[in-house]
Image (cartoon, rainbow, N blue to C red):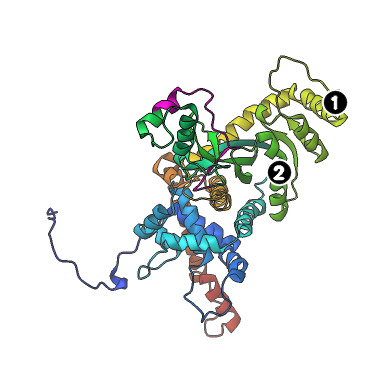
Amino acid sequence: MAMGKRKARQESLFVPTDRLVPSAGHPFYERLNALLAEAGFDRWVEGRCRRYYEQTETRGQPSIPPGVYFRMLLVGYFEGLDSQRGIAWRCSDSLTLRRFLGIPLDEGTPDHSTLTNTRKRLPAEVFDEVFQFVLGIAVAKKLVAGGTVGVDSTTLEANAAMKSIVRRDTGEDWSGYVTRLMRAEGAVGPDREPTAEEIRRFDKDRKGKTVGNAEWVAETDPDARIAKMKDGRTHLAYKAEHVVDLRSDLVLAAEVVPADHGDAATLVDSVTAARVNLAAAGSAAGIGDVAADKGYHAAETLELCDAFGLRTYIPERRVRHRSRWVDKPEGFRRAVSANRRRVKRAKSKALQRWRSEVCERTFAHICDTGGSRRTWLRGLEDVAKRYRIAAAAHNLGRLLRLLTGVGKPRALQGGGGVVFAVWEWFGIAGNAVCRLGVLIRTRLRPPADSSHRDGTEQADARNAVT
């Protein structure tokens, strides 16, 4: 065989689409499309979103289909893209993702501004129902166990810098606030403006320096709160809380709240949202046992969980003094005592180990490798919309992993890809063998009398070949 040489040539100005080499497509996205098509996702979401568009097709330019929009958000999770610009560029650059979205080669993919306009047009209820629809697929596959859930939370970095915070009372930024303190102490005259170096030196040496959400607010994102991140940095952030089915690793609820809300204050709301999602998904499974870390322990929260029929397994913080119940309701004491008895059991220790593994894994998938640790959107509602679809994408990945053994497209690069390819080959080969067997049986069937064969037998033979 002779060696080919690369030639520099002028490409044709026009290439017919029938002469383009078709892309084989990614096996993972092919399976994901098949799963969504089996559940009737496009028909359902188009019917759900029709009320938010013009009812007459002659008015205005047609929007992108809602199924394409939500698929692009799924791509953001599976490809680890945190921004809409990155999602739009990746979808326009990849032939595999074009095929996944159903966009032909002679049409352009949606721009990042189109994603923004679609997100603003659709209310938060639609994103909640898409999450519930994906959960309904798991219910139909009988993969939701229910019963025991784990609850945990993490912080999401907001799209706002600490330099943008201003005083709630006066509207001063940090430099203006420090300048006022300098004038009050006589460090600078009333008519002279201090330099940036003088402001930094004064701010570094002064005592009692604190920054709290009660006095400061971000001017660019008022819903973000000052919080300490997982790596120790102080940043404007949101809090994401997961309620996870410990048996199937499926996220039953993914709630986003301001970062200054305590864990004990949001536990009951998150578990209630998980119950609502299970009921909307058509699941008969309930939630009875709740495992969480010691940050969720509070007498009022435990009493409220008992009122909702939840058995809590939450360890207590170590304190130097004994609990006093003189000025507290009797229900608080009973709830704390019952939780204390349950925590001492071997079941509680097993649930804590199980919870720490499963819940942290969901955060690793959604936040770290799924591109949701740092949000590029502003406002609690928009951040919650995007994060909830990322949680739905995580559930789809878990479904595909339970059904096919692969939960993300990048998993096909390792040993899981070999198993998936062998499984695909056996599926194709088995289908071909079945068709070949039907064809052979039809061809080798001994005819009674070819000249007198009735039309019914001929039709049966044709149907068998087909």
Front residue of 127/246: it is 127
Quarter location, residue 13:
bottom left
Element marked by disc 2: helix
The circle drawn on residue 327 is 1
219 falls in the magenta region:
yes
Residue that extends furthest to the bottom in the rendered view of this protein? 451
The three-letter amino acid code for the residue at tag 2 is: Asp
The magenta segment is 201-221
The residue beneath circle 2 is: 269
Judged from the image, the secondary structure of the residue bearing numbered disc 1 is loop
Identify which amino acid the numbered label 1 is placed on.
Answer: Asp
Q: Position of residue 247 (x, y in %)?
A: 65, 38
Q: Quadrant of the N terminus?
A: bottom left
Work out whether mark 1 precedes mark 2 in sequence or the reverse, and give the earlier one.
Answer: 2
Residue 37 percent location from the top left of the image: 55, 62
Residue at 37% from the left image edge and 60% from the top image edge:
92
Quadrant of the image occupied by residue 449: bottom right
Q: Position of residue 431 (x, y in %)?
A: 49, 59
